Image (tube, grey):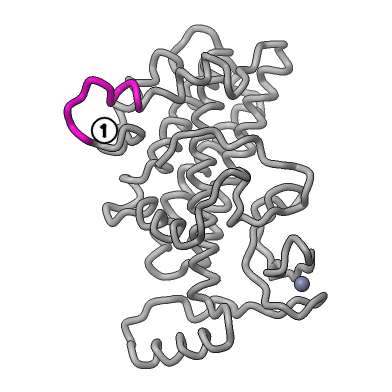
Amino acid sequence: MVWCFAATSPAAAGWVDRTDLTDPTDLTDPTDLMKESKKLRPSGGYRQTASFQTATLIYDATWWFCERFLDARSRTVDQMVQAARSGRQNIAEGSRAAATSSQTELRLVNVARASLEELLLDYEDYLRHRHLPQWAADSPEASEVRAVPRTFRKDRSDPSDPTDLTDLSDAQRWALYAHWLEHDDPAVRANATICLIHQANYLLDRQIAALEAAFVEGGGYSEQLATERLRQRRKDPTDRSDPTDPKPPTCPQCGKLMALRTAKAGKNVGSQFWGCTGYPECKGTHPL
Ligand SMILES: [Zn+2]
C-alpha cells in the first residue's frame, strides 16, 4: 500500500472512470484492484483497516482543533466535527455491510469519501480566510508528514510493510503525529490534517475502484455472467450476495452495457449512476 497524495480531484469532468483513478501513470488493472480490495478489507474487520485508522486520526485531530481554535458556538465547528465523524462512521458501516451487499458497502464508502472531501474544504477555507499558508503537496512539510510510517519503520528489524501502521494502537499512532496535531500553530495542525485527509481519500478511492470493478465482474457484466450467477445462487443457498443488486442496463446512446460509477465532482459528487463502458468515447449515462 502506498501512502501518497492523490491530487485534488479533477473538477473538469462531471465524472471520471474510477478504474483509471486520477493518476495517469497508474497501470493497475482491475484484477490487482480486486486483490487489493482484500488487503483494504482484511478479515480482522474495519478497525484493522488503514482507512478507518486514518479517519480516526482525522476525527480526533478535528475535535481538538475545533475545541482550541474555533468558537464552540459557530456552525463551522458542528459541520467540521460532523463531517469528520461521518467519514469515520461510514467506513465502519460500509465494512459491516460488506458481508451482505457490495452495493450498500459501495454507497457507504462513497458517503465517507464525500464527508472527508467536505472536511478538506473546511480546513482549506480556514487557512485561506486567515491568510495562513497552505503546504504544497510536494513541500518539505507535507513530505515529512507523509513519511511518518516510513520514518517509524526505519531502523526496525521486523520486515513489516514500511508504509503500514495498522499494527499500532490508536494512541501509538496518534503519538507519531502529535508533533503536528498538537502544535500551537493552527496552520500546522490544519495542514497536517489536510495531509491525512488526502491519505484517507486515496485509500477510499482505491477501495471504491476495487468495489466497482468487483461489482462489474460479479454483478452480471454480460447476460451470460448474470445467468451463471443466478444458477450458482440457486445451487448455493448460503450465497449472501444481495439479490437486489441491480443489473446493468444498456447505454441509451450506443447500446453497450453500462457499469456502476461514482460522480467525482459537481453537485452529485459521491452519488452512483450507470455510465457507458465505452467511456470516454461514449459519455452516455443513466440514473441508478
Ligand atoms: Zn454508450
Q: Main secondary structure of the magenta part?
A: loop
Q: Position of residue 136 (x, y in %)?
A: 62, 20
Quarter of the image with the N terminus in it = top left
* Front in this rendered view, residue 159 or 272: 159
Residue 153 falls within the magenta-colored stretch: yes
The region drawn magenta spans 150-159
Q: Horizontal and vertical percent for residue 65?
A: 52, 20
Callout 1 amino acid = Leu
Q: Is residue 264 left or right of residue 50?
A: right
Task: Give x and y (percent) for residue 22.
Answer: 63, 45
All told, the count of numbered labels is 1
* Dot 1: element: loop
Taking the magenta stretch, the answer to whether it contains residue 211 is no
Res. 124 image quadrant: top right
From the viewer's side, name the closer residue of 120 and 93: 120
In which image quadrant can residue 57 be found?
top left
Q: Is residue 288 left or right of residue 37?
A: right
Which residue occupies the extreme top position in the image? Answer: 184
In which quadrant is the C terminus drawn?
bottom right
Residue lying at the far left in this picture: please name it: 157
Q: Up-down: is 70 above or below 194?
A: above
Position in image of residue 112 (x %, y %): 54, 47
Report whether the residue tagged 1 is closer than 8 Å to ligand 1.
no
Residue under the point 45% across and 18% down? 144
Residue at x 65%, y 35% (from the top left corner)? 8
Ligand 1 - quadrant of the structure image = bottom right
Horizontal arrangement in the rendering, residue 250 relative to residue 82 (left or right): right
Q: Residues within 10 Å of mark 1 (few under 14, many from 20)?
A: few
In the picture of the structure, the residue carrying the numbered disc 1 is 168
Residue positioned 38% across, 38% down in the render: 53
Using the image, determine if residue 249 lies above or below residue 166: below
